[in-house]
Amino acid sequence: MLKQINYATIISILISYSSFCQSNAKKEISNYFDKTVGDEILNSNNGKIHIDHYNLKNDHNYYLNKNFVTGTIYYDNQLYENVPIKYDIYKDQLVKSFGNTNSLAIDLISEKTDYFLIGGKTFVNIDNKYKYPKDATGFFEEKYLGKNFSLYIKHFKTSKEVVTESAVYTEFEEHSNSELLFESKFRTINTQKEISSIFPQLKSEIKDYYRKNKFLEETNPDQFKADLIKFIDNNLQSLSWKI
């Protein structure tokens, strides 16, 4: 449980208005829920009701899965394991289920969320972890932690409306940005040129690495970037020994 959330109360409410849920919009459900349970669970320590406003046809706005999966959260200085969560990467928002149901959920307060584990990946709130000035913000996948630097991946989605004869749908497209934490600064490294500019002493090695690992770059770009950064990290250590 998170703080003072009373799941027995929530489950009772869910049962009492299940027919209501089936016949009304999500916004109306949220209003009903707010009115019924009041501040007992909807306070600043817990979050607010999560609402999806999108009419979906193909894709969705979440990381990997639109359904809740079992994960781990470090929230408000406490660790919670085996928690039903999903990550809305369009809004950069972690969402938690109420009582293992898909009917109701809350948006956890990002400032209180230090990190979470979902789909075998670790996501950290870099606003909490790194206090020095930076352009990057929000939740990032912690992809590689090395001796000289660390690699973080920002997963996000863009949206567009698609109009048909019968309805208007929202479609999402997934993207990612790679950020290298090096010398207490986040540096974007989405291209070979950007990486080579940071490590000019390894420019030929980086070029060769791209050439030899082109298939991985095309099929799994995030893993390619992690392997490349590890390769650079090891080579920098070798150069320091020679010096």
Image (cartoon, helix red, strand yellow):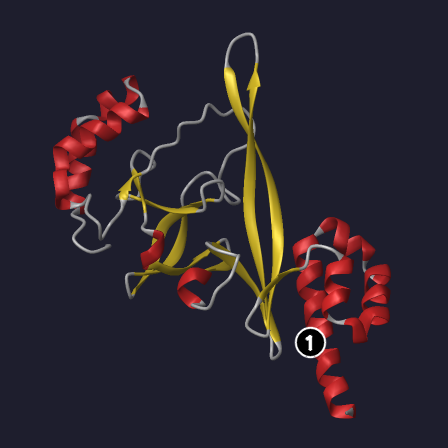
Q: Which structural element holds mark 1?
A: helix
Q: Quadrant of the C terminus?
A: bottom right
* Residue 236 locus on image (x, y percent): 72, 80
* Residue 226 locus on image (x, y percent): 66, 64
Quick one: 103 or 113, which is closer to the camera?
113
Mark 1 packing: few (<14 Cα in 10 Å), some, or many (20+)?
some
Quadrant hosting residue 67: top left
| Location of residue 233 with respect to 32 vertically, above or below | below
- The residue lying at 39 percent from left, 31 percent from top is 52
Residue at image mark 1: 233
- The residue lying at 28 percent from left, 19 percent from top is 24
Amino acid under label 1? Answer: Asp
Quick one: 13 or 136, which is closer to the camera?
136
Query: Relative to 225, is 62 on the left or the right?
Result: left
* Residue 156 locus on image (x, y percent): 54, 45
Query: Relative to 159, is 102 on the left or the right?
Result: left
- The residue lying at 31 percent from left, 21 percent from top is 25
Quadrant hosting residue 148: bottom right
Quick one: 8 or 62, which is closer to the camera?
62
